[in-house]
Image: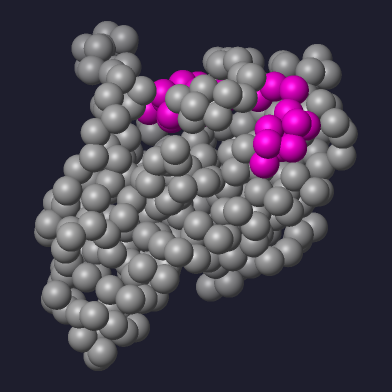
């Protein structure tokens, strides 16, 4: 059964608390914008498409309060989908709560359809029958509503019997790859191995990968793509190894208002996540640290961008 990552149920937002996975599958009920912002900032709900749905449903909880809507819109800066989802629902404020809810549910339903379409288009694009795919972070159903973006392509390949193996980067510091992507791949029954982030470029150079598939948090008008930290290193490794580097993301992640990558705000999540691993300190007390949560891959390193509507070759 597919897990529904985020939904509107009986007058509240329900979402899977992703901080507890893979150990526990717990659903939170969220009744206020404050609770939703807290859930977004501690990454209980995360991933660009899921943040778009969270933003849209959050406007229903905001009851038209412009301050609460603005705070929700700014809860995380890099994934454009959050602001996009808020704006999609807020455009219906004049129609009252029912109109806002209908718009938010459409954002949810459009995501389900878009992920299915991206999965098929991405699988059609890749050549070969026994594909070895490398990916970073989590771009599966947990990052969207039911199926994911890059991991949605993996799922479609698996369903078509064309997937040999997934190499999933663990994705320090918050381990979305180790905790979430492996959990989803195991539920799919898809063969996979977990690798350290720093092993990615080496394994590409060794020739063990047919394509790198990643998601996106914001794609600038020129194709430069912000995604989870570590994506750029994979793009460089893929270019050197002659391996296709494919971004899979919905049209809502393309931000025509941002001309190029240097204009994308990169979220800095502070030193705490670097000097500790799941609450255990790994560096000497007082160590300074830097924690950009995303990086930007320049468009000339991207072989293709697959959306629900088209394949773009930047
Ligand atoms: O910090 P996160 O976990 O929200 O980062 C998520 C990513 O970087 C994903 O790759 C991106 O949002 C695309 S999800 C389909």
Residue, x 56% and y 16% (percent of image)? 194
Q: How many marks?
A: 0
Q: Quadrant of the C terminus?
A: bottom right
Q: Is residue 9 visible?
A: yes
Q: How is the image coloured?
A: one colour
Instruction: Choose between 138 and 228: the one closer to the eye.
Output: 138
Q: Quadrant of the N terminus?
A: top left
Residue, x 45% and y 41% (percent of image)? 2
Magenta highlight on residue 31: no
> For the magenta stretch, what is the residue range?
156-182
Residue, x 55% and y 61% (percent of image)? 113
Q: Residue 52, located in which quarter of the rendered image?
A: bottom left
Residue 65 is situated, as x and y percent measured from the top left of the image, at 14, 76
Residue 38 is situated, as x and y percent measured from the top left of the image, at 19, 47
Residue, x 29% and y 40% (percent of image)? 16
Q: Residue 239, located in which quarter of the rendered image?
A: top right
Residue occupying the far front of the picture = 1
Magenta highlight on residue 169: yes
Instruction: Choose between 79 and 155: the one closer to the eye.
Output: 155
Q: Is residue 65 above or below residue 228?
A: below
Residue 306 is situated, as x and y percent measured from the top left of the image, at 70, 55
Residue occupying the far bottom of the picture = 94
Q: Is residue 81 above or below residue 232?
A: below
Q: Is residue 204 visible?
A: no
Q: Residue 284, located in which quarter of the rendered image?
A: top left
Q: Is residue 223 above or below residue 275?
A: below
Residue 307 is situated, as x and y percent measured from the top left of the image, at 66, 59
């Amino acid at each position: 059964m597919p897990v529904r990552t985020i939904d509107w149920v009986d007058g509240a937002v329900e979402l899977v608390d992703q901080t507890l996975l893979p150990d526990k599958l717990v659903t939170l009920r969220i009744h206020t914008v404050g609770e939703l912002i807290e859930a977004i900032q501690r990454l209980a709900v995360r991933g660009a498409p899921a943040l778009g749905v969270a933003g849209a449903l959050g406007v229903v909880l905001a009851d038209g309060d412009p301050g609460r809507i603005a705070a929700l819109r700014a809860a995380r800066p890099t994934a454009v989908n959050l602001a996009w989802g808020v704006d999609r629902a807020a455009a219906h404020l004049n129609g009252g709560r029912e109109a806002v809810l209908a718009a938010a549910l459409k954002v949810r339903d459009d995501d389900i359809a878009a992920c299915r379409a991206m999965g098929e288009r991405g699988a059609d694009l890749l050549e070969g029958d026994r594909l070895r795919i490398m990916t970073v972070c989590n771009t599966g159903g947990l990052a969207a509503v039911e199926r994911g973006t890059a991991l949605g392509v993996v799922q479609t390949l698996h369903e078509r019997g064309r997937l040999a193996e997934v190499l999933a980067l663990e994705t320090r510091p918050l381990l979305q790859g180790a905790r979430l992507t492996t959990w989803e791949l195991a539920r799919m029954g898809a063969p996979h191995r977990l690798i350290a982030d720093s092993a990615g470029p080496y394994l590409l150079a060794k020739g063990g990968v047919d394509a790198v598939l990643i998601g996106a948090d914001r794609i600038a008008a020129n194709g430069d793509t912000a995604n989870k930290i570590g994506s750029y290193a994979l793009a460089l490794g893929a270019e050197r190894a002659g391996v296709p580097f494919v971004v899979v993301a919905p049209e809502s992640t393309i931000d025509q208002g941002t001309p190029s990558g240097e204009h994308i705000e990169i979220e800095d999540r502070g030193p705490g996540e670097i000097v500790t691993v799941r609450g255990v300190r790994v560096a000497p007390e007082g160590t300074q640290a830097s924690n950009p949560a995303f990086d930007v891959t320049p468009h000339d390193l991207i072989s293709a961008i697959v959306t629900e509507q088209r394949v773009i070759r930047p």
